[in-house]
Amino acid sequence: MIAAIKPAGANTRGLLAYLYGPGRHDEHLDPHIVTGFAMLGMPDPGRNPDATLTQLAQHLDEPVHLRNSEFGKKITDHVWHCPVRAAPEDRHLSDAEWADIAQRIVEAAGIAPPGDDLGCRWIAVRHADDHIHILATTVREDGRRPKLHDSGIRVGDACRQIETDYGLRQLKKGDRTAARRPTQAEMHKAQRLGWEQTSRDWLQDRIRAAIPHASNTEELLAYLEADGIAIKPRRGPSGDLLGYAAGRLGDLNKDGEQIFHPGGRIAPDLTLPKLKARLETTEPEEHPTARRDQPATPWHRATDALDTLQVGMADDAHAQAHITALGDLIEVTAQKAPVRLQAELRAVSRAFGRAQRSQIRAENQAAHTLRKAARDIAHTATGPDGSALAALLAALVWATVLAARWHEAKNHAQQTEAARQTLHHLQVAADHALTPVLDSLATRQPSEQAGRTLVLDIRAAIPDHADRILADPAWPALATVLADAEAGGHNPHQILKEAAAQRELTTARQPARVLITRIQHTSRNPAPNPRAEAARRRSTMTPAPSGHLARNPPPTTAPTISADQRHRQR
């Protein structure tokens, strides 16, 4: 059940004309009052042919007129309007049930507190099977204004309890971090203009798509302008950027002027201060002993960055930062992925947008590596090869699982549900990306003897999951990947243990597929040879008798033993 409190209005008679009228888009049938502040003597134009809308408006506005005449300063924001709608699959409620629901909502909102005979005047009008409209005038009988601060939260809590009591569809509890729902006027305007999205939804998608491409807010606004979005910056006397509003070209008001939406009204996390905190983090200094052998492509770097996500989830502020940056990486992956995967990945990005934000303040500096990986992908001119994309999508699946678990542990119901929806779309995309990789691997399976040796490796390295892995249809492809890794100097037993440690396999739908992407990613380079490395260091660090460095001797290479050779040795 959704109770959507509308912005305060000033025309009681005008709202009544809509509630009792034929409807502009949805047909209004049998409009009538189901309950109100005092039913005795209440004029109801829907039941009494002698009652008029003007009489009903005057009846509701009487405390407002008294206050205006007493204090002299006219109140112009006294009309409180709250449509309350059941879910499409819910049963039709009776007038008596709707009356009880309306009473509970005005009590929760503070319009008519329980046991208070001096509350505001209000009515609930029903003109359809699935919803009512509550109209109140926000001046109490004693002339005071009601306390409506945070009324939306209280009304939402009341709706959750009403759903339980009446056996209706259970919605998730909100936390004030969701984007505002489109208004009826916005939806009807989009329909009239042939737009698939309302202006605010369209702008939200465009701004989120632009974030990975910018390193500061000035760059972001310039990128948006270049993308055909109208931008109205707000600057101080010094020229510093203080705020911004964005508009969709062609979205005009009745005077033909461009309509602009402030960033915070597009989405709560798109205000200028939050964008600054998200984009303008300084790059941490690299430790002198940090590894320099970075993977060659940004796709591999992104997968490596995701491998650190589990460690980053230990602290709440760090976890929120990583989840926000994860959304940037998902968005830019959708932009750069092959065309055949873009529709599913766009659905992934839209679903995860709700999981990106919560009430926990993010320590954005903590997610610098993940955000940099997203920017590197945004600025690359080349797309990923099949195995690199499959590895990245598999890593994104696991990262989304971690995000869902964190939100669930924090009782973030809306975000948990959004992460689970994301996971569904992401798994579909990951399966599609891996299919051609599996087809290619299946054409060159190792020999039967080598396969038997690799089975022993599986049972020794991952005994708890060996049966599931070997029963997975992708096992032959995994055997090929292990044989390739062994040919590159890797130990199959060791690389299997490392892959299983990076992503627990209990929740994996197809464990062999998970191992394929992990092992292909980690074994893409030949394994380091300790003997060769020691020889190289001796040759470059030991001075020759003449005082000059000795000439590098040829590296010593340890022999590689294939699965076939290991089988014969056994």
Image (cartoon, rainbow, N blue to C red):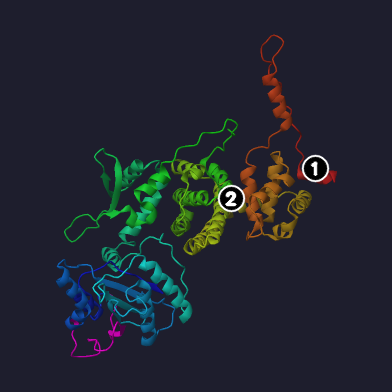
Task: Note whether residue 228 is visible.
Answer: no
Question: Which residue of the protein is positioned furthest toward the top in this rendering?
Answer: 546
Q: Residues within 10 Å of mark 1 (few under 14, many from 20)?
A: few
Question: What span is in magenta?
Answer: 25-53
Question: Which residue of the protein is positioned furthest toward the right in this rendering?
Answer: 570
* Foreground disc of the pair 1, 2: 2
Circle 1 residue: 565
Q: Secondary structure at mark 1?
A: helix
The residue nearer to you, when weighing 530 against 489, is 530
Seen in the picture, residue 8 relative to 381 is either above or below; the reply is: below
Circle 2 residue: 310
Seen in the picture, residue 492 relative to 50 is either above or below; the reply is: above
Return the x and y of residue 448 as percentages of the image width and height.
77, 52
The residue nearer to you, when weighing 555 against 265, is 265
Amino acid under disc 1: Gln
Label 1 or label 2, whichever comes before in sequence order: 2
Q: Main secondary structure of the magenta part?
A: loop
Quadrant where the N terminus is found in the figure? bottom left
**Toward which corner of the image does residue 144 lie, by quadrant?**
bottom left
Horizontal relation, residue 492 to residue 355: left or right: right
Q: Secondary structure at mark 2?
A: helix
Return the x and y of residue 558 as percentages of the image width and height.
75, 33
Return the x and y of residue 45 as percentages of the image width and height.
22, 86
Return the x and y of residue 370 as percentages of the image width and height.
51, 45
Labelled disc at residue 282 = none
Query: Which residue lies at the image location 29% right of the left edge and 66% below the top edge?
Result: 191
Find the distance from the CA under tag 1 to the CA under tag 2.
38 Å
Amino acid under disc 2: Gln
Horizontal relation, residue 259 to residue 363: left or right: left
Magenta stretch contains residue 475: no
Horizontal relation, residue 250 to residue 500: left or right: left
